[in-house]
């Protein structure tokens, strides 16, 4: 892209994921971040809503900060399929030329984002934990032109052992996927009405359109840990599946939810839905109990924004104590039941 072509690209666009006519929470989170980025660039934030019979969701997007909603509505878009959705989003990008395009790193977004970025010939930074507007390179270097107002996309690299900041200075849009729970939505603007633009590039099914024969919905009985205000999280140190009963008891007294580290899932003690961390979910509860969790950087990345972190571990050198507000060194088999009993007595007063 030449310099002139780059300047034709304006605005921050957010893919507003919906399934079965229900918007995914990550759409509102991305609008929150999109609004901040748009303010720095003195531009607008636009939600792109793709589906069949989904126009009724547009006002909800306005309530969470969308200045404009582009709706692509077509029967071919009823269920998510890579080809028609990629065609829809790539067509919107080519038609409206956004400077920035954000997508949630959900199962759908991880499929859609890379497909679309390849189609519109731009880069994509996956699984970003931070997005901001700034200069690239970060420090002016003699002999290298420094570009301003770039999207600086930060993500963990090399298994979370380092943090990389990535820019895409020579192509537009600048695309990023962001995992759910990382960005924060704005306070709802009650009664906001969407400025809707309808656009349909036309859909001609071809041999790349898969046919969905059957959709099977699994009934989940696990709680959504991303919504919990109090999390009682266990690691390898809990020792066994049966021993998680100690954490269940503590969570019950507090009205909290149990979560866990990756090692616990790998041992088959808890389902993957309850995993916190870089390969699990990012959580921001008011209180996070880290019990028998050593505190590997990959785990910490998923919970460090908790308001209050309480760590219980027998190893006083465990890295978890570096991020904890309160730390208890000792045997969790003694501490957790004692804490549960004390809280029960306190609440039973």
Image (cartoon, helix red, strand yellow):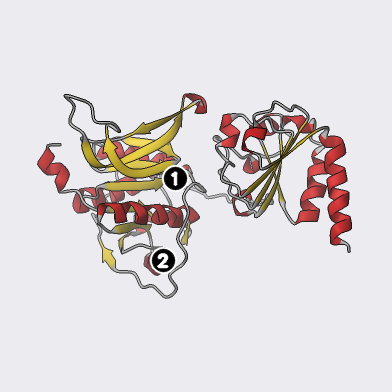
Percent coordinates x, y for residue 5 in the rendering: 13, 43
| Residue depicted at x 27% and y 34% | 136
159 or 48: which is nearer to us?
A: 159
Q: Quadrant of residue 196?
A: bottom left
Whether residue 208 is visible to the viewer of this picture, yes or no, is no
Q: Is residue 126 left or right of residue 261?
A: left
Q: Which mark is residue 211?
A: none
| Residue depicted at x 19% and y 52% | 95
**Sequence-earlier tag: 2 or 1:** 2
Whether residue 9 is visible to the viewer of this picture, yes or no, is yes
Q: What SS does tag 1 mark?
A: helix
Percent coordinates x, y for residue 155 in the rendering: 43, 35
| Residue depicted at x 29% and y 44% | 206
Q: Looking at the image, is 197 positioned above or below residue 24? A: below
Name the quarter where the N terminus is drawn: top left
Q: Which residue is mark 2?
A: 57
45 or 208: which is nearer to us?
A: 45
Q: Is residue 158 left or right of residue 309?
A: left
Q: How many marks?
A: 2
Q: Which residue is mark 1?
A: 108
Percent coordinates x, y for residue 27 in the rendering: 43, 55
The CA span between labels 2 and 1 is 18 Å
223 or 345: which is nearer to us?
A: 345
196 or 146: which is nearer to us?
A: 146
């Amino acid at each position: 892209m030449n310099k002139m072509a780059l300047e034709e690209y304006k605005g921050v666009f957010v893919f507003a994921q919906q399934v079965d006519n229900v918007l995914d929470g990550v759409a509102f989170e991305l609008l929150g971040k999109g609004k901040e980025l748009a303010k720095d660039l003195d531009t607008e934030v636009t939600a792109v809503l793709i589906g069949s019979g989904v126009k009724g969701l547009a006002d909800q997007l306005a309530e969470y900060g969308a200045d404009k909603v582009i709706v692509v509505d077509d029967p071919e878009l009823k269920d998510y399929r890579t080809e028609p959705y990629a065609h829809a989003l790539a067509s919107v990008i080519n038609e409206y030329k956004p400077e920035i395009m954000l997508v949630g790193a959900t199962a759908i977004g991880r499929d859609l984002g890379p497909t679309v970025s390849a189609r519109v010939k731009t880069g994509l930074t996956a699984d970003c934990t931070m997005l901001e507007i700034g200069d690239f390179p970060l420090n002016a270097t003699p002999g290298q032109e420094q570009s301003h107002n770039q999207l600086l996309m930060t993500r963990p690299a090399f298994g979370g052992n380092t943090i990389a900041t990535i820019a895409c200075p020579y192509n537009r849009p600048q695309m990023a996927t962001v995992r759910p729970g990382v960005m924060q939505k704005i306070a709802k603007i009650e009664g906001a009405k969407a400025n809707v633009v309808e656009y349909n590039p036309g859909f001609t099914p071809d041999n790349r359109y898969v046919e969905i024969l059957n959709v099977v919905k699994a009934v989940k009985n696990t709680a959504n840990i991303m919504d919990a205000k109090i999390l009682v999280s266990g690691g390898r140190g809990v020792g066994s599946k049966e021993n998680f009963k100690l954490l269940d008891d503590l969570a019950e007294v507090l009205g909290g939810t149990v979560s866990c580290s990756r090692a616990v899932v790998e041992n088959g003690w808890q389902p993957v839905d309850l995993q916190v961390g870089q390969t699990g979910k990012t959580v921001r509860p008011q209180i996070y109990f880290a019990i028998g969790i050593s505190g590997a950087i990959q785990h910490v990345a998923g919970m460090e924004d908790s308001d209050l972190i309480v760590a219980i571990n027998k190893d006083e050198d465990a890295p978890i104590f570096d991020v904890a507000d309160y730390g208890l060194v000792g045997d969790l088999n003694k501490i957790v039941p004692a804490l549960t009993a004390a809280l029960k007595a306190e609440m039973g007063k």
